[in-house]
Image (spheres, coloured by chain):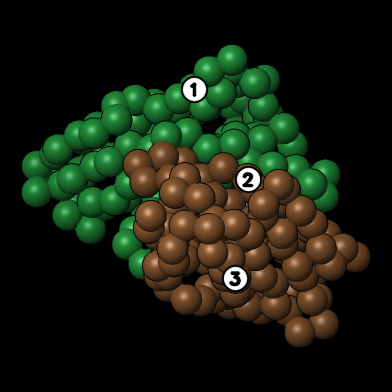
């Protein structure tokens, strides 16, 4: 069964610090990998999308990397802000997947403290 | 544009009661989805629709029914609610499958508690 595992489950950092979130997946064949941000009480919002041929993608202070050989991705947050407090979800799409179905990781809950 | 909206935001049901969750999108998207999100678990697909009048089962369809009578609306029904259906339900929509960078847009969620 396709799986997406994220670590750590939760993380607390001080405002202004950097952090890196990890994602390992077993989805194969692989089409693309996305990172979503989910604020408490809200729906997920897309941050980045990478295909198998891309190994890095940035969106402001968020930088996602992908190693398709080892099936690992990371999300690096630079100069964290209080508004970065949220859950970050790694999502993988399989090739030839009917209905655009996605496999979601359990998320990393990030808390940024002043 | 309002994007994807869901009603209600919160609901409490007794075991055995029925209810319908409504999802609406104003982006003219072909595809719509219903997910449930439980603590510590990733979102799981309940049902989805690839166009008006069509529906298909996802990963966890048991106990739920759906209808897509209009392109902009996707309804999720619980005929006889069970405590195991206590969850947060998210609706999402996207233009179509096949595009590598296709993004699903999510609604704000409906929190359901079944007693």
Cβ atoms under marks 2 and 1 closer than 8 Å: no
Element class at badge 1? strand
Label 1 in the same subunit as label 3: no
Instruction: Return the x and y of residue A78 as percentages of the image width and height.
Output: 63, 59
The color chain A is rendered in: brown
Cβ atoms under marks 3 and 2 closer than 8 Å: no
Kindly identify the residue that appears in the image at 20 percent across and 34 percent down. B11
User: Badge 1 is on which residue?
Assistant: B24
Q: Quadrant of the C terminus of chain A?
A: bottom left
In the picture, measured across the screen, residue B62 lies left or right of residue A88, that is left
Taking depth in this image into account, of A63 and B90 the one nearest to the observer is A63
Q: Quadrant of residue A113?
A: bottom left
Q: Mark on residue A20?
A: 3
Number of the front mark, 3 or 2: 3
Instruction: Return the x and y of residue A63 as percentages of the image width and height.
Output: 71, 59
Kindly identify the residue that appears in the image at 69 percent across and 72 percent down. A73
Instruction: Return the x and y of residue B2 as percentages of the image width and height.
Output: 53, 18
Which of disc 2 and disc 3 is earlier in sequence?
3
User: Badge 2 is on which residue?
Assistant: A46
């Amino acid at each position: 069964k396709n799986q997406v595992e994220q670590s750590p489950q939760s993380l607390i950092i001080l405002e202004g610090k950097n952090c890196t979130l990890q994602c390992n997946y077993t989805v194969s064949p692989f089409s693309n990998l996305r990172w979503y941000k989910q604020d408490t009480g809200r729906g997920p919002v897309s941050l980045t999308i990478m295909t198998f041929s891309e190994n890095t993608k940035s969106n402001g202070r968020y930088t996602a990397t992908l190693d398709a050989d080892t099936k690992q991705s990371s999300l690096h947050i630079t100069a964290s802000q209080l508004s970065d407090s949220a859950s970050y979800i790694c999502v993988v799409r399989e090739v030839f997947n009917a209905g655009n179905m996605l496999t979601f990781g359990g998320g990393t809950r990030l808390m940024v403290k002043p | 544009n309002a994007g994807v909206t869901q009603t209600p935001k919160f609901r409490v049901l007794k075991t055995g009661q029925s209810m319908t969750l409504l999802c609406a999108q104003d982006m003219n998207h072909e595809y719509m989805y219903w997910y449930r999100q439980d603590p510590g678990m990733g979102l799981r697909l309940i049902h989805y629709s690839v166009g008006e009048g069509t529906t298909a089962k996802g990963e966890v369809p048991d106990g739920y029914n759906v209808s897509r009578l209009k392109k902009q609306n996707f309804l999720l029904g619980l005929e006889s609610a069970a405590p195991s259906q206590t969850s947060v339900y998210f609706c999402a929509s996207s233009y179509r499958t096949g595009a590598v960078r296709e993004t699903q847009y999510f609604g704000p969620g409906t929190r359901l508690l079944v007693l």
